[in-house]
């Protein structure tokens, strides 16, 4: 059985969305590397961008998404953790690349994955908060 759900958070300044489609039953880390020369561009749907995440959770694209808010497809509520977007810029503020990172799974799975990343003990995942989709 496949559960289809669309989860979005707020709207971006320009009203565009980053539509993130995940494989059914996906669980794990997702990393989207943006602005990679020679990589395929993201699909456009009007003013929105669409990214289809493969089973390994890694996406590489030449597109740099600066202001579009995320909308998750095929994800149950409360399963998106640690969403962050970074856009790298030149000294004169031109975008040259970036990353979008987040985790799909339960809070326990997210905390376990974060603990493995930060074995030094300097980072505590106890402050984990699900991505607010209201």
Image (cartoon, rainbow, N blue to C red):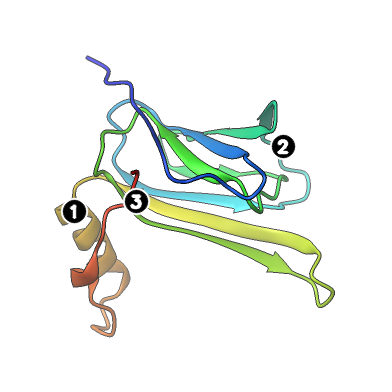
Judge whether 30 appears above or below 54 on screen: below
Residue 134 place in picture, x, y as percent:
33, 44
- Distance of label 3 from label 2 (alpha carbons): 23 Å
Report helix, strand or loop for mark 1.
helix
Identify residue for label 3: 103
Q: Quadrant of residue 125?
A: bottom left
Residue at image location 25% in from the left, 77% down from the top: 119
Residue 113 place in picture, x, y as percent:
26, 59
Residue 49 place in picture, x, y as percent:
63, 35
Cβ atoms under marks 1 and 2 closer than 8 Å: no
Identify residue for label 1: 107
In the rendered view, does 40 fall on the left or right side of 58? right
Judge whether 11 appears above or below 112 on screen: above
Label located before the other in sequence (1 or 2) = 2
Instruction: Name the residue at the left extreme.
Output: 108
Count of residue discs: 3
Label located before the other in sequence (3 or 2) = 2
Residue at image location 23% in from the left, 83% down from the top: 121
Other-residue count near label 2 (Cα within 10 Å), few / some / many at <14 / 14–19 / ≥20: some
Q: Quadrant of residue 75?
A: top left
Identify residue for label 2: 41
Residue 123 place in picture, x, y as percent:
28, 79
In the rendered view, does 92 fall on the left or right side of 51? right
Q: Nearer the viewer, residue 130 or 1?
A: 130
Other-residue count near label 3 (Cα within 10 Å), few / some / many at <14 / 14–19 / ≥20: many
């Amino acid at each position: 059985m496949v559960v289809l759900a669309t989860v979005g958070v707020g709207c971006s300044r320009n009203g565009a969305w980053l539509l993130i489609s995940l494989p059914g039953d996906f669980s794990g880390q997702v990393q989207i590397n943006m602005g990679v020369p020679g990589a395929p561009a993201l699909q456009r749907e009007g003013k929105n961008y669409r990214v289809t995440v493969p089973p390994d959770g890694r996406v590489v694209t030449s597109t740099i998404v600066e202001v579009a808010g995320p909308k998750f497809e095929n994800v149950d509520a409360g399963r998106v953790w640690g969403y962050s977007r970074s856009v790298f810029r030149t000294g004169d503020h031109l975008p040259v690349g970036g990353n979008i990172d987040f985790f799909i799974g339960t809070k326990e799975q997210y905390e376990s994955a974060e603990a493995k990343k930060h074995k030094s003990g300097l980072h505590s995942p106890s402050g984990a908060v699900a991505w607010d989709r209201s």
